[in-house]
Image: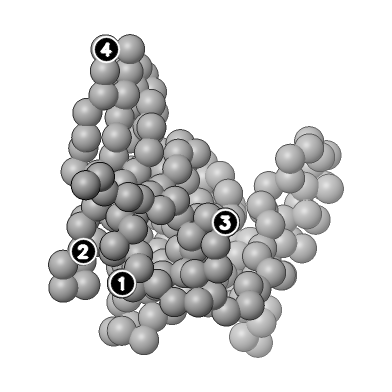
Amino acid sequence: MSIKYIELEVLDVEGSQAPSEAFALIVHEKGGNREMTIVIGSQEARTLVLLLNKIQTRRPGTHELFKNFMQHAGYQLSKVMIYHYDEGVFFAHLLLENEDGNFELDSRTSDAVAIALLMEAPIFIREDIFEKLAVESCQEEEKVENIHPEVDLHPEELEHYIENKLQEMPLVELEQLLQGAIDSEDFELASKIHEEINARKS
């Protein structure tokens, strides 16, 4: 009997009801109406918030470094497979391939999802795991769009564009973005986020 998998889409990162260091990664079945939560740590949440909002940092983080290394080595990420679940812990592997073949690389699920977002690879989960944990989706909230526009803007227009996007983000997401920008050494972006946070709190 072959094992069936369901393709997932990453929706959001939210605060969790678990301890304060934990966050919830919300994933949704592609073409369906059910979603599932994966508990992740604060550092992983920062990384995923940056990736979901397509914020480009000045220096590569760990996941960007992995992506660049794999591409220079001639590998591509075919897909991510979440293949096991045990006592609240998800297990995943990356399916990497090159001209000579492919192999599976074990990974934390949060890292696998981050790399999949970076390399634009699909994410799958075993159907039996998803059926066990999935719930019907609530009405989707409007997501914040890419903080960087797809078209080239003059410096003054770009500054205004980024300021507007930051103003649209909820405070909790701004705080995650701030730490992510600091971790990635993008201090110019961190300064803009910090100013927006202070403006709301004052």
Q: In the image, 88: left or right of 18?
A: left
Distance from Cα at disc 1 to Cα at disc 3: 18 Å
First in sequence: mark 3 or mark 4? 3
**On the image, which quarter does residue 183 sit in?**
bottom left
> What residue occupies the far top of the structure in this picture?
99
The label nearer to you, 1 versus 4, is 1
> What residue occupies the far left of the structure in this picture?
86
Distance from Cα at disc 1 to Cα at disc 4: 37 Å
User: Residue placed at 44% from the left, 77% from the top?
Assistant: 135
In this rendering, does residue 138 appear at all? yes
Q: Secondary structure at mark 4?
A: loop
Residue named by callout 2: 85
Distance from Cα at disc 2 to Cα at disc 1: 10 Å
Residue 52: x %, y % from top left: 54, 55
Distance from Cα at disc 2 to Cα at disc 4: 31 Å
Residue named by callout 1: 132
User: Residue placed at 54% from the left, 75% from the top?
Assistant: 137
User: Residue placed at 16% from the left, 67% from the top?
Assistant: 86
Label drawn at residue 3:
none
Q: Amino acid at mark 1?
A: Lys
Q: Are discs 2 and 1 less than 8 Å apart at CB? A: yes
**On the image, which quarter does residue 23 sit in?**
bottom left
Q: Are discs 3 and 2 less than 8 Å apart at CB? A: no
Residue named by callout 4: 100
Distance from Cα at disc 3 to Cα at disc 4: 33 Å
Q: Amino acid at mark 4?
A: Asp
Compared to residue 131, the image places residue 184 above or below, namely above
